[in-house]
Amino acid sequence: MMTDLLNLMHGSKPFLLRMVSGRVIEIPHPDFVAMTPERTALVLVRREEPRLEVIRINQIESIEVADDTAAA
């Protein structure tokens, strides 16, 4: 899963993180997220409101490429 996440972070498509809690977190573009040097967490910049969110990588259940065709 780490390889998939790193590949998506170096791409240009939006993606979704499905958390073990059932929560779904939308990453609108890889520019909005960064990984900590230890590779234990992601830092997400929320564009709707000026705040940061820390996401623990061990709490990610799956990663999906978002369907951006609905926005067109």
Image (cartoon, rainbow, N blue to C red):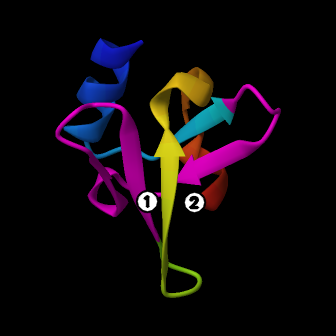
Disc 2 marks which amino acid?
A: Ala
**Viewer-proximal residue, 3 or 58?**
58
Badge 1 local density, few (<14 within 10 Å), some, or many (20+)? many
> In the displayed structure, does residue 4 sit left or right of residue 55?
left
Residue found at the far bottom of this picture = 50
1 or 2: mark nearer the eye: 1
Percent x, y of residue 27: 49, 52
- Tell me which residue sits at (69%, 32%) in the image: 19
Residue type marked 1: Leu
Instruction: Tell me where the magenta segment starts and ends, as one range.
Output: 19-45
Q: Is residue 44 above or below residue 10?
A: below
Residue neighbourhood size for the residue with mark 2, other residues' Cα within 10 Å, grouped as few (<14), some (14–19), many (≥20) = few
* Residue on which disc 2 sits: 72
Q: Dot 1 corresponds to which residue?
A: 44
Image quadrant in which the N terminus is located = top left
Vertical arrangement, residue 63 with respect to residue 67, above or below:
above
Report which quarter residue 49 is drawn in. bottom right
Based on the picture, tell me whether residue 30 belongs to the magenta stretch: yes
Q: Secondary structure at mark 2?
A: loop
